[in-house]
Amino acid sequence: MFTGIIETLGTVTQLQKSKDNLEITIKSTITDALKIDQSVAHNGVCLTVVEINNDAYRVTAIKETLDKSNIGDLRVNDFVNIERAMKLGDRLDGHIVQGHVDQVATCIEAKETNGSWLYTFEYNPKLNNITIEKGSITVNGVSLTVINSGKNNFSVAIIPYTFEHTNFKTFEIGTTVNLEFDVIGKYVKRLKELSL
């Protein structure tokens, strides 16, 4: 489980295909605190640390992950939002995040608004995921509050701290991002479907 509060940015240093999988090496300031077999969220995708080498570590993304996220779009030198799993008993500063990406979205608006930033994302509504006004959403692993919720789009407002300390600063129109919709909303939607 994660909170959607990003700890640090990592930098992709190597990408290597292995059959249908992608081996990703990331340089990070928290590598020395990681261990083999640890779950770490990368742009909101929970991946397992499989190797550590000095200040870099390697994770493996399987085909299912590559099909449902933007992880396969990573390039060497890209920034990645990183969060380690939360400790039991810690404050939950964001919201409950599983690290299981539901689908991707495309940035259709990115603008500075006198001290903050407004981003609008559009996603495929055929997957039946939903947002609600003032509800929670995870974008590339960042816990955010939805504004301007639409049928297949929503906006978020970013404070300067989040802009500077996540890869939001690299987003532009056309950028593909990972979405994890609020787990409570997903259960409510599913229960409603089963009762029809």
Image (cartoon, grey):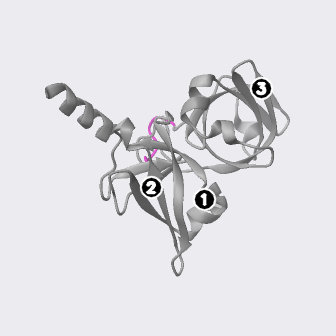
Regarding mark 3 in the picture, which secondary structure is present there? strand
The residue tagged 3 is 17
Regarding mark 1 in the picture, which secondary structure is present there? helix
Q: Residue at x 19, y 33 (%)?
A: 192
Q: What residue type is disc 1 on?
A: Phe
Range drawn in magenta: 87-92
Identify the main secondary structure in magenta: loop
In three-dimensional space, the C-alpha distance between marks 2 and 1, rounded to whole angstroms, equals: 12 Å
First reached walking from the N terminus: tag 2 or tag 3: 3
Image position of 189 with respect to 162: above or below: above
Question: 10 Å neighbourhood of mark 3: few (<14), some, or many (≥20)?
Answer: few
Residue 147 picture location, percent across and down: 36, 62
Q: Residue furthest top?
A: 19
Residue 168 picture location, percent across and down: 60, 59
62 or 175, nearer to the observer: 175
Q: Which residue lies furthest to the bottom in this view?
A: 114
The residue tagged 2 is 144
* In the image, residue 128 lies in the stretch drawn in magenta: no
C-beta proximity under 8 Å, tags 2 and 3: no
The residue tagged 1 is 168
Asked whether residue 166 is in view, the answer is no
In three-dimensional space, the C-alpha distance between marks 2 and 3, rounded to whole angstroms, equals: 32 Å
Question: 10 Å neighbourhood of mark 1: few (<14), some, or many (≥20)?
Answer: many
Asked whether residue 67 is in view, the answer is yes
Q: Which residue lies furthest to the left in this view?
A: 196
Q: What residue type is disc 2 on?
A: Leu
Image position of 189 with respect to 194: above or below: below
Q: Nearer the viewer, mark 2 or mark 1?
A: 1
